[in-house]
Amino acid sequence: MLKISAPQIDSLDHLRHILRNLPGPDTAARDAALAREPLLTKPRGALGRLEELAAWLAAWQGRHPPVMDRPAAATFAGNHGVMKHRVSPCPVEVTWQQSKNFAEGGGSINAFCRSTGTEHKTYDIAIDSFTRDFLEGPAMDEDDFVAAFNVGMAAVEAGMSVFCPGEMGIGNTTPASAMAMAIYGGTAEQWTGYGAGAVGPIMERKIRVVAEGVAKHTADSPDAVEIARRLGGRELAAMAGATLSGRLQRVPVLLDGFPCTASAVFLEAFQPGALDHCRISHASAEVGHGMLTERLAQRPLLHLGMRLGEGTGAVLAVHLLRAAVTCHADMATFDEAAVARAER
């Protein structure tokens, strides 16, 4: 098994090597959690998915009982060359402005982090330059992709209870849609949603850009890692890096909405099981997100009609993880409480 003390990659081939040698779950910790659940003073299965979450956290934290003493989040910001085609009604200046707002604590992500006791950092990734318009060529060269990916890898630290990646990048639902379509097939109309409010001619351009970009960059049947380089973006690469870093450092990951989930699917497409340490935090209102959750065979934890990004849905789901861990660790057993068990 490949061991990495300070996760970083030096090339796409290095990334491929890591993906082929991923560590698995701690089965002893998972089995301990599964063994404790039937002993707790409640009917078997009465806490539904909270019981599964406790076992999932134990397995991927590598400890029992699992803990939620250090949840962490990061918002990665980047700009996209496809914005030259006006695929979003928002001006690109919003990326810079919102990133500054997050750094100063004024965003929704900051409020959610305060409400859940979650650490938060903002990472501007070459925010003063744009990725290449992928209708003209690959969005990133290999060095650019590797540098952005490593920003995400370095954002995760061993000992974090869970990590919540998020993004800020005007126009990023366009590369997210293109990456999803390139990996899973389908049409641009199926994968392309409203994003920050694309309607009418903007939506028509957005669909066209997605369709043309996928056609251009999949003609030679690239693998999933290459698709992420050609059609993605820096903040998307960083979120994928953070997701992989979590796997390597025994930090479970809560995926956010559509761009966040789309950023990570190439890992799973390249190496099935690469996202087993992840849960999808919420069902985004963005049309492509429902399709991604189906492809990944995951059920989002929350269904609130959110589509803000930033990591907000993931951080909101930290409340559920805290409840799952607290019940699992603190609830009395039948023997401790002298409560009779139901017949089986």
Image: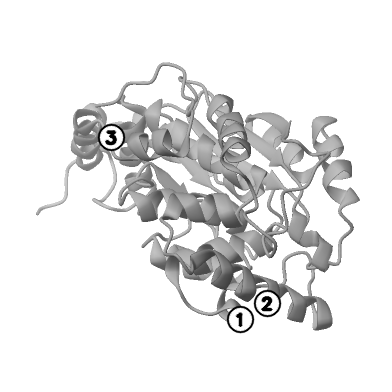
Q: Amino acid at mark 3?
A: Asn
Above or below for 34 versus 71: below
Give the CA distance from mark 1 to mark 2: 6 Å
Q: Foreground: 222 or 285? A: 222
Label 2's element?
Answer: helix
Q: Residue at x 31, y 48 (%)?
A: 273
* Residue 338 visible (yes or no): no
Quadrant that contains the N terminus = top left
Residue toward you, 40 or 10? 10
Q: Determine whether label 1 and label 2 are within 8 Å by CB.
A: yes
- Dot 1 or dot 2: first in sequence order is 1
The quarter holding residue 103 reads top right
The reply to whether residue 246 is visible in this rendering is yes
**Quick check: 47 left or right of 180?**
left
> Of the residues shown, which amino acid type is indicated by label 2?
Ile
Q: Nearer the viewer, residue 16 or 38?
A: 16
Instruction: Give the mark nearest the N terminus, 2 or 3.
Output: 3
Vertical side of 208 occupied by 333: above or below: above
Mark 1 highlights which residue? Answer: 189
Q: What is the secondary structure assignment of the residue under circle 1?
A: helix
Local packing at callout 3 (Cα closer than 10 Å; few below 14, some 14-19, many 20+) is: some
Do the residues bearing badges 2 and 3 touch, measured as CB atoms within 8 Å?
Answer: no
Q: Which mark is residue 21?
A: 3
Residue 336: name its quadrant.
Answer: top left
Residue at numbered disc 2: 207
Cα distance between the residues tagged 3 and 1: 36 Å
> Depth check: 179 or 318 in front?
179
